[in-house]
Image (cartoon, rainbow, N blue to C red):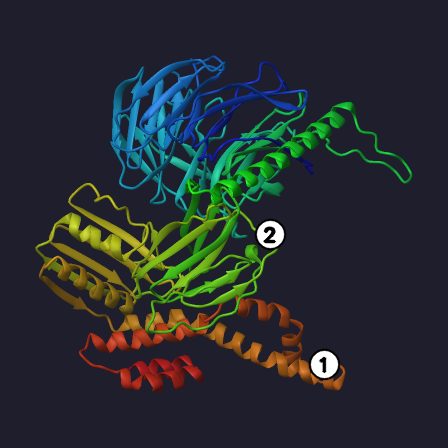
Amino acid sequence: MEIHLNRVDYIQVGVTSQKTMRLLPALRKKATQKVAIADHDGMLTCFGMKKGDAVPVFKTLPGQKITRVALGGALGTPQEKIFVCSGSQVRGFTKKGKQFLTFDANLTESINAMHVSGADLFVCASYIYNHYCDCKDQDYFLSGDKINDIACLSSENLTHLVPVLACQDRVLRVLKGSELVYDIEVPGPPSVLELYSKDGGEEILYGTIDGKIGLMQIGEHSAATKWELHNNKKKGGILCIDTYDIIGDGVNDVLVGRDDGAIEVFGFDASSEPTLRFEHVLSESVTSIQGGCVGKEGYDEILTATYTGWVTGLTTEPQKAEAGPGDEVKMSKETQSKVEALRAELDQLQIKVLQGREQYQQSSQSNTAVSAVPVFSINDKFTLCQDNASYSLTLEVQTAIDNLLLQSDVPIDLLDVEKNSAVVSFSECDSEVSSVCSVWHKGFFFFSPVFSNSVCNVRPTRLDLSLRSIEGQYGTLQAYVTPRLQPKTCQVRQYQIKPLSLHQRMHSIDQDRPMNRLSLVGQFSFAEIHSWVVFCLPEVPEKTPAGESITFFFHNTFLGTQLEATYCKGEGHFKSDNISTISILSDVLSKEATKKKINLNISYDINEDSVNHTLKMIHPKLEYQLVLARKVQLIDALKELQVHEGNADFLIPEYRSILDESTNLLEEYKKQPAHLERLYGMITDLFIDKFKFKGQNVKTKVSSLLEILDNYDLNSLLDFFQ
């Protein structure tokens, strides 16, 4: 069943956080609903629609940034009381704007997730979960990793409310009181949770930072996965989920909002898994999504809130009138008055802008002028993408971006991103100068170890970059963001490029692989060795884990090799099927211990079989890239032959297929700059590291290794390593 939705913009508030917009319950079926939305200015705004216009019901005074909004009320009654959290404080408002609750949770960190059920209040800070009943402390739990969201299950089959925590370490934690009952492993770091049925039940939807969606059935002692949707099209991460029957087939559909602006509707047919029925893309990240009836009575719609505070609806109400040839489109009086009001508002805004510019010019020429730095918010995300072993850097500003500068003190590759549609050229930096270079993007400067140039017609508020680092070379990437504001101002964001930057957390590893071992013994505390591991590897919580020891598992997203890290006070043990990973860890951990003046007793157990194992893992990637490079080299010559002969019929089938696929081959080659060189570098490092542990320096034989790689054959390469 196809679905047709039309976009309607309602109002704009300040910058919004995740899940800060809610629809109040309707008074009757298909009646219009009020909208409550909170922003970073600390204001809670409630509005409804009257004669096509957004009419405010109430608006609170500015204050501390509001990070979450939830609805509540007595059990069995309409959930129309509005709860907001800012800092460590929770406030409650009636649907008419009267404040009836001010509760301070006395947390050292700000609340970032909240759930309300009757007299029960559940709040989460970064690592802390608290449960209050009638504002009295009930339960407490300290999570092993950052808590991103919380939801509570209730049904006739459950004897009590079941809190579920979405944690950064790819785990859903199910609690009972202050105790952890069990963990549920999910395929990515969960960013949002939502009950599948608003009336309760045991089913819960989750969305992950890397764009996956799933449905779990959770009991008091066990859980089962109903379905999972993978992010095969590499869309943005999930920020918000809701369920609503927007298609009208009597079954709740899944509404999804992503951080790249995508809005999706998944419906159900004969299969148990949902299928995509509708998609719409906004220019900003979608922080909240709700299904209901807002614009006009009787017409369902999907209501969204974006990062910059736009409240937008996708309604089933027809917005366009169609006319045949020679017919006139008659506009209703309501539409005519709306158009006239918009024109009048636009004229007033243009007058205000002109007056403001004149006042600014006059004040800037006087001696008493004071220049105030404009304040602006940045929504940024720096995440490792498993699919192509690259880092995705997303920067979103509440106003148009004038230019962006990236500065890196380590080599990084800037990969092509389709969303930016940029033409890029590169040049090397002066090695004596800090590796600061730029990419021009119609006023957008990307500073990295290469200079590039790209052109874009529109100045967007959002920018997506894709970068790839080299393991073993670590440092800092700095982003200087300059919006299109006067006077000019800039904000800086810093991102750490870690020594093992292409490694990603996983739940377990293959223990049958040939492993190399690194062991450290010394007078260091649990917190000190944990800080070293945090420095070396991504996705490790900064907070020292509870208990006396901890084990983490990782896999290299580029090669597929694995790493196990187990450590406690005075000891650290690391296992990997890649000698280069052990070598990097050994060098970095030794340097960090030396900074603290801690003596380490380091021992190695090198497995010779691991070298051949790693080379065989590299083999299909290297072979594919060599074939791709050779095909690309032949394209120009084959095209010249085709032009000279008038057709390509005389060519053998292999060459004809290269000509037919030339466009796709060139695009693929362009998307992976220096991919072949990276593989060469990894094999070279593996060769040097193998003999380094034997006390031999083989750098003089690297040229011979490169000759073998240029005439690549796996058996010849394996023989050379022996």
Circle nearer the viewer, 2 or 1: 2
Helix, strand or loop at label 1? It is loop
Which percent across, then down, holds residue 449? 40, 67
Q: Which mark is residue 648?
A: 1
Which percent across, then down, holds residue 118? 39, 16
Sequence-first disc among 2 and 1: 2
**What residue is rendered at 54% in x and 79% in y?**
630
Quarter placement of the C terminus: bottom left
Residue 548 or 499: which is nearer the viewer?
499
Query: From the viewer's perspective, is 145 left or right of 707?
Result: left
Q: Is residue 668 above or below residue 191?
A: below
Residue 360 or 130: which is nearer the viewer?
360
**What residue is rendered at 82% in x and 35% in y?**
322
Which residue is farthest right? Answer: 326
Give the class, few, some or many, for how many residues have Cα within 10 Å of label 2's Cα (few <14, many ≥20).
few
Q: Is residue 148 above or below residue 477?
A: above
**What residue is rendered at 43% in x and 57% in y?**
405
Query: From the viewer's perspective, is 457 left or right of 582?
Result: right
Quarter placement of the N terminus: top right
Asked if residue 587 shows in the view, the reply is yes
Which percent across, then down, holds residue 416? 52, 62
Q: Which residue is mark 2?
A: 458
Which percent across, then down, holds residue 17? 44, 35
